[in-house]
Image (cartoon, grey):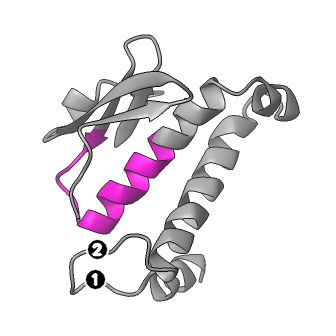
Amino acid sequence: MEYPSSITIKGQRYKVEYVETLREVGANFEGEDWIGFCDHANKTIRVFADRVPFDIVETFLHEVTHGIFNRNKALKLALKDGAEEIFVDAFSTDLLAFLLENGYIQLPEGLPPITKRIVDEVR
């Protein structure tokens, strides 16, 4: 599996950067560093990459979902203020589970199965 260096979201090209420090992600909210950021103005997605592949892909999909949300008027209208993060977090995790469980993508060997990881996190 290769990590993409650029993607297209609804006709807009986004550069994807995998950074080594949280500071390079470039986002901080209420004193909390983020592990990913979708910069709509500069069409850039940054992902903190000093983690296991599952976490990198999960963050990448999370930020891609923010990009889709930003370019979709119906989603913006349907979700009230503050609901974007809740929606994006749940949807991107479920999307990754779907992609892995159905063989559309594979992560390096040695990581727990997606279903086991999700079940363990919910407990």
Task: Tell which of 7 and 59 is nearer to you.
Answer: 7
Decide if residue 32 is in sight here. no
The answer to whether residue 52 is magenta is yes
Decide if residue 10 is in sight here. yes
Q: Residue furthest front?
A: 11
The reply to whether callout 1 and callout 2 are in contact (CB within 8 Å) is yes
Residue topped by disc 2 = 107
Q: Which residues are magenta?
A: 47-63
Q: Is residue 71 above or below residue 121?
A: above
Residue 86 position, x and y percent, is 67, 47
The secondary element bearing badge 1 is classed as loop
The secondary element bearing badge 2 is classed as loop
Q: Amino acid at mark 1?
A: Leu
How packed mark 2 is, by other alpha carbons closer than 10 Å (few <14, some 14-19, many 20 or more), is some
Question: Residue 71's quadrant in the figure?
Answer: top right
Residue topped by disc 1 = 111
